[in-house]
Image (cartoon, helix red, strand yellow):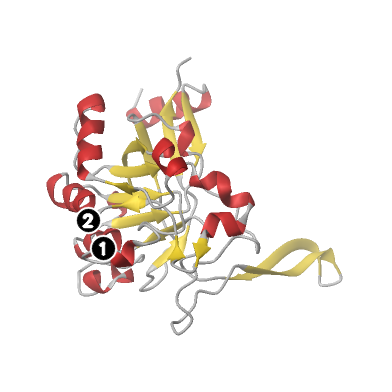
């Protein structure tokens, strides 16, 4: 039996589980909000074209509009100034081999529950490696915070106050370690951005965006169901829409996990 046939048989027999890491996208999904003087991302909107009626008796379909960075979404290197001149830096030119890979899940849910501004550090990553083994090159590192469970309340999910947004994310030394010492493919979070809400105070500001995209790597935001993944052993598939010169796109993120049965 070929490798692909074995894989298909394992999925059919439920020896491999498929975990959907994607939120449902609807008009209530919170949009990214920047300072008032900056350009703003359009929220998701959907408009019915026809539904088996006088507008089209045999078919149902919709028009939709949204920002590239809406819902569970992908960041390409061209999204950030540090990656603007790199080759193959947009969603239509990224090598397809980069859109899949092993996943390492760093469980920071306890820390994030106590501190909305929690930062994942290199020290925390080294402690994870001491327990689970070294993060392999070309892996996706996913920061589990259980922030996705807040999506039922858009205000709590965004978590703004007079000082700005408060959501957990990576520190500068964590991103330097993952990009330069571990050569990861990308970094994913359950929050609305790959960076912490207060990451503009860091140096460099927004290190996930700056360092990942400057090195030609990728980001995933608004992930769901990370609590269903093991620390290691899952395999991630995350192709964005092939938008010409696209800086990102909503997408369906799937993880394949070997079943215990």
Q: Toward the viewer: 260 or 13?
A: 260
Residue at point 51% right, 39% down? 225
Label located before the other in sequence (2 or 1):
2
Residue at point 23% right, 52% down? 175
Q: How many dots with numbers?
A: 2
Residue identifier under label 2: 172
Could you tell me residue 80's position as x and y percent? 30, 70
Q: Verify CB contact (< 8 Å) between mark 2 and mark 1.
A: yes
Q: Toward the viewer: 223 or 206?
A: 206
Give left or right: position of 254 versus 121.
Answer: right
- Judging from the image, what secondary structure is the residue with disc 2 in? helix
Residue at point 54% right, 66% down? 31
Give me the C-alpha separation between circle 2 and circle 1: 7 Å
Q: Residue furthest front?
A: 162
Could you tell me residue 259's position as x and y percent? 45, 21
Q: Residue furthest bottom?
A: 37
Where is 133 relative to 161, above or below?
above
Label annotation for residue 202: 1
Label annotation for residue 216: none
Could you tell me residue 237's position as x and y percent? 39, 45
Where is 77 relative to 96, above or below?
below
> Taking the image as drawn, is residue 99 in sight?
no
> Taking the image as drawn, is residue 51 in sight?
yes
Q: Residue furthest top?
A: 261
């Amino acid at each position: 039996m070929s490798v692909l046939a074995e894989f298909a048989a394992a999925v059919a027999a439920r020896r491999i589980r498929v975990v959907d890491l994607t939120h449902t996208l609807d008009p209530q999904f919170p949009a990214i909000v920047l300072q008032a003087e900056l350009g703003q991302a359009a929220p998701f909107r959907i408009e019915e074209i026809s539904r088996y009626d006088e507008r089209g008796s045999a078919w149902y379909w919709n028009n939709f509009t949204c920002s590239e960075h809406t819902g569970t979404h992908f960041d390409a290197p061209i999204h950030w100034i540090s990656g603007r001149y790199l080759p193959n830096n947009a969603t239509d030119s990224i090598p397809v081999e980069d859109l899949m890979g092993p996943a390492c899940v760093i469980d920071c849910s306890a820390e994030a529950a106590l501190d909305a501004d929690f930062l994942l550090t290199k020290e925390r990553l080294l402690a994870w490696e001491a327990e689970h083994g070294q993060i392999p090159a070309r892996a996706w590192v996913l920061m589990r915070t259980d922030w996705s469970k807040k999506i039922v309340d858009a205000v709590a999910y965004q978590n703004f106050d007079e000082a700005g947004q408060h959501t957990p994310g990576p520190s500068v030394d964590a991103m330097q370690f993952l990009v330069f010492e571990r050569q990861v493919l990308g970094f994913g979070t359950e929050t609305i951005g790959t960076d912490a809400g207060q990451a503009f105070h860091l140096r460099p500001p927004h290190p996930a965006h700056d360092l990942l995209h400057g090195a030609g790597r990728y980001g995933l935001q608004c992930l769901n169901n990370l609590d269903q993944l093991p620390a290691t052993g899952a395999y991630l598939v995350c192709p964005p829409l092939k938008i010409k010169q696209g800086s990102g796109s909503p997408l369906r993120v799937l993880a394949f996990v070997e079943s215990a049965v």
